Amino acid sequence: MTSLLTNTAAMVALQTLNAINSDLNTTNNRVSTGLRIGKASDSAAYWAIATTTASDNGALGAVQDALAIGQSTLDVMYNGLESTRESLQKMKELLVSARQPGVDRTNVQVEIDGLLTDMQNKAGASVINEQNFLAVDSSAADWNATKAIVASFERSASGISISHIELDISNLTLTDAHATAASKIGILDQARGVAVSGALAADATVTVLDVDISALTDSADDLGRLEQFIQLVDDAMVDVISAQNSVGVNLARAESQLTFVHALMDANERAVGSLIDANMEEESTKLRALQTQQQLSVESLSIANASAQNVLQLFR
């Protein structure tokens, strides 16, 4: 039965065409954006997981930057300590050579003074990002010996947490601007408790920066004092080596963590991609098929609409 008022064939053809057009629009969008899931309405669960993971990756990018700055800070600190160790080694050699009777200790002291000035200058210049861990002021109101480098961003069921690489610089710094001499913690300017004889009292203490042999003679007391200076410098050099070891360990940790964070970010990107990226080979094949179906549906709709014209021929 053919009806002029109700064209069932055309309705079916139109519904089919609308469905094909909707699928074609979806496929076109996937091909143009490269995303299978671009918004929450596409898949609420996968979209939420992918968006959260992408957000965490942004935080890990900030961690990566912080680690790079921290690594540079530790590297500058290590180089400053290395330069100081070399200067202390030269200073010790000069003091040992000054132990020889008849040596002009005034000229030797000129070289020692140059080394002392050089060590203090390099400690003060070991700055990056306005941070200096070698020249400090432990009497400052905001003084904190524990320095933390952001190392990781972690998400768990209980919430998020930030991991750190912590470094205690109380035994690593070279100079301290503390007003009280006895409270200084710098390797170069801390009182070491080395008893000296001669002009100073038996319980007096000196620092590396106090070393002065220009007035020493070949007397037994002065030679004993010179040997105590040698011991003082050697003790300071041992402390610098220990500080280098501590900084080197943390520098290696920062380098390892930086590599891990980079790998973790890559893994997160792959995870997000597996959730929301479109399969371009599959989508391109589907696009070609839908375009063919669309053409056939248009043709079918045209045939269905032409049926009324065929009925009209019966009345002629």
Image (spheres, rainbow, N blue to C red):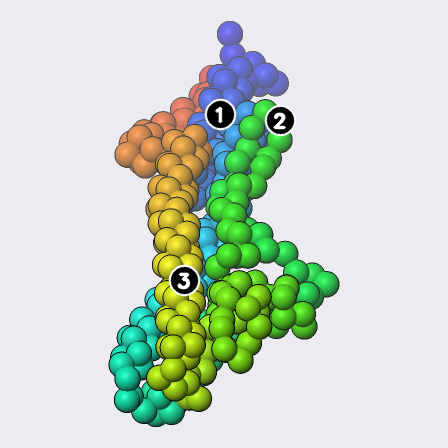
Which residue is under mark 3?
235
Neighbours of disc 3 within 10 Å: few (<14), some (14-19), many (20+): some
Q: Decide: marks 1, 3 in contact (CB < 8 A)?
A: no
Q: Nearer the viewer, mark 1 or mark 3?
A: 3
Give the mark, 1 or 2, whose residue is nearer the N terminus. Answer: 1
How packed mark 2 is, by other alpha carbons closer than 10 Å (few <14, some 14-19, many 20 or more), is few
C-alpha distance separating marks 1 and 3 = 85 Å
Instruction: Tell me the element at label 2.
Output: loop
Residue that numbered label 1 is attached to: 19
Quickly name the residue at label 2: 158
Residue that lies at the very extreme toward the front in this rendered image:
220
- The structure residue drawn at horizontal position 41% and vertical position 85%, both measured from the top left corner, is 216
Q: Horizontal and vertical percent for residue 209?
A: 49, 76
> x, y (%) of residue 14?
50, 25
Residue located farthest toward the right when viewing the structure as drawn: 141
Can you tell which mark lies on residue 7? none
Q: Residue at x 34, y 33 (%)?
A: 279
Answer with mark 1 or mark 3, whichever residue precedes in sequence.
1
Instruction: Identify which amino acid the numbered label 3 is placed on.
Output: Asp
Determine the CA span between mark 1 and mark 2.
45 Å
Q: Amino acid at mark 1?
A: Ala
Q: Which of pointers 2 and 3 indicates the residue nearer the eye?
A: 3
| Towards the viewer: 44 or 50 | 50
- Nearest the viewer among 183 and 143 is 183
